[in-house]
Amino acid sequence: MSKNITEAKIFACRQSQAIGKNIADAYGVKLGNVIFHSFSDGEFQPSFEESIRGSRIFLIGSTHPSSENLMELLLMIDAAKRASARHITAVMPYFGWARQDRKDKPRVPIGAKLIAKLLESAGATRIITMDLHADQIQGFFEKPVDHLYASTIFIPYLENLKLDNLTIASPDMGGSKRAYAYSKFLKSDVVICYKQRKKANIISHMELIGNVEGKNVVLVDDMVDTAGTLTTAADLMMERGAKSVRAICTHPLLSGKAYERIENSKLKELIISDSIEIKNKSKKIKVLSSANLFAEVMKNVHNNQSINPFFIK
């Protein structure tokens, strides 16, 4: 029997076509052919237009709202399972619904756990994702999870900026672990923002723990949604004497008035990954590609090799 490993096949959901094509190019294969038939009521059906029997396939799809994006990935996984794919790896640059990782008050769901069960029930045999909102989400799965860190693309960019008096900042207490990880690698100071919310996406008060006077500050977070926290923190730091304030956010949800807030803020630059395709262009927004990171990890997974070299954080 031949010991050669069959070539992997890569397919992308509709919402992740851009990053899917870039990953396929970096991997060195052509993006697979999948079409979607839509019914008049909004229902849709994916169809693989090539044989995937016995293959390892990678399905690329971020699951940011609307819920159609998640449903699309689930249907593609189910279709692949019924087409006798050997291994089905869900490549999720952004793992949506991850903010619901625990019960923070009575009578609410744990949405991230539900998503994990749905993916496994659909037939996913492995998950590859990047910068989960909470590391413990990996434990919601019974299948292998490769949790990549966008620090592998962000840190080289920061190093090339050659900022003096660099200080890493977390926009909230929950992100302090991430901020300390960056500061340890970059050998910089750390400051933390303490915020209180009236309700989701609305900040009632923010305070700064640490000194930013004369510092070039880089705020680090896993996602930017309405940009209210980031822009409030940036403005506060500039008021406290910071030399400049940049922000690194892996997943650019950018909903509501996010673009307007970013343009009107004192942020010098917002550095993001391409896990979600942004709707508008801005001189303040710098997009870094994660395609090479995903492609190299996917190659090693397919060839049963270690992915440890791809972890900086």
Image: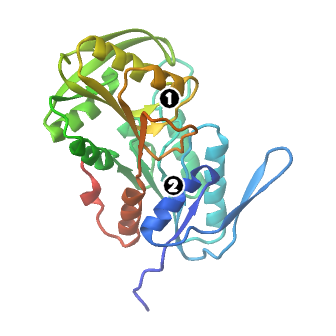
Going by the image, does 85 lie left or right of 183?
Answer: right
> Which amino acid type is shown beneath numbered disc 1?
Asp
Q: Could you say which quadrant of the image residue 303 lies in? A: bottom left
Q: Is residue 176 visible?
A: yes
Residue sitting at x 28%, y 34%: 178
Sequence-earlier tag: 2 or 1: 2
Spot occupied by residue 164 in the image (x, y as percentages of width and height): 15, 32
Disc 1, SS:
loop
**Residue indicated by mark 1:** 225
Question: Residue 52, which numbered label?
Answer: none
| Label 2 close to label 1 by CB (< 8 Å) | no
Disc 2, SS:
helix
Instruction: Characterize the local packing of mark 2: few (<14), some (14-19) or many (20 or more) Cα atoms within 10 angstroms.
Output: many
- Total numbered labels: 2
The residue positioned farthest toward the front in the image shown:
283
Spot occupied by residue 87 in the image (x, y as percentages of width and height): 51, 67
Residue sitting at x 45%, y 28%: 102
Vertical position of residue 152 compared to residue 249: above or below: below
User: Quadrant of the image for the C terminus?
Assistant: top left
Going by the image, does 172 lie left or right of 83?
Answer: left
> Which amino acid type is shown beneath numbered disc 2?
Ile
**Residue indicated by mark 2:** 19
Spot occupied by residue 155 in the image (x, y as percentages of width and height): 26, 44
